[in-house]
Amino acid sequence: SEGGVAGLVKRADDNLGVVADFVSQNEWIDFLAKDPATRSSTSVCLTLDLDPDQIKKFVALLDAKEVALDIGGYRDAPPSIRIWCGSTVEKEDLEALMPWLKWAYDEVKGN
């Protein structure tokens, strides 16, 4: 019903597009993989203009609101967050998440 593998890949790419649009509009967040050719369209890793303790607080705020669970970056990665954007995620859910990322950032930064 999704168009086979090609349809599922398109869903993941569209989901990545939601995150990419958000990143392009906010200078405090960026892709961990600087080269677009090496970015995953499923497990999207992002860096924030926050120190490691602030990132932990950012993650905890989103978890406490039950907005984003297990969004913390990989243990062996630089301080970061990761968002699952695979084909099992609805684009609308990612669109709804983006303002929450801004909210959590503002809370941590005291904006």
Image (spheres, helix red, strand yellow):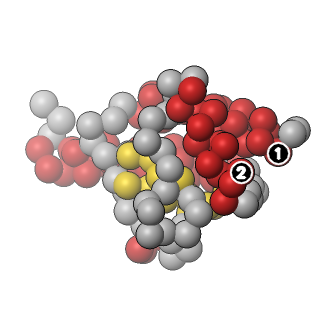
**Where residue 6 sits in the image (x, y, percent)?**
18, 51
Q: Is residue 97 above or below residue 82?
A: above
Location of residue 32 by image quarter: bottom right
Mark earlier in primary sequence (2, 1): 2
Going by the image, does 78 lie left or right of 105? left
Q: Tell me: 43 left or right of 102.
A: left
Residue 55 in view, yes or no? yes
Q: Residues within 10 Å of mark 1 (few under 14, many from 20)?
A: few
Residue 17 is situated, as x and y percent measured from the top left of the image, at 48, 49
Q: Residue 109 — which label?
A: 1
Is residue 22 in view from this perspective?
no
Q: Considering the numbered disc 2 on the image, is that residue within a helix, a strand or a loop? A: helix
Quadrant including the N terminus: top left
List the single residue furthest toward the front.
Answer: 53
Question: Which one is in front, 29 or 95?
Answer: 29
Please say if the residues under marks 2 and 1 sit with CB atoms less than 8 Å apart: yes
Q: Residues within 10 Å of mark 2 (few under 14, many from 20)?
A: some
Compared to residue 13, the image places residue 98 above or below, namely above
Q: Nearer the viewer, mark 2 or mark 1?
A: 2
Taking the view exactly as shown, the residue that stands out farthest to the top is 65
Q: Residue 34 vs residue 101: left or right? A: left
Percent position of residue 80, x then y: 57, 59
Q: Secondary structure at mark 1?
A: helix
The residue sitting at 82% across, 45% down in the picture is 109
Inspect the image, locate mark 1, and give the three-letter code of the amino acid beneath it: Lys
Residue at the (55%, 69%) spot, across then down: 78
The alpha-carbon separation of the residues under discs 2 and 1 comes to 8 Å
> Between 25 and 85, which is closer to the camera in this rendering?
85
Task: Tell me which amino acid carries mark 2.
Answer: Gln
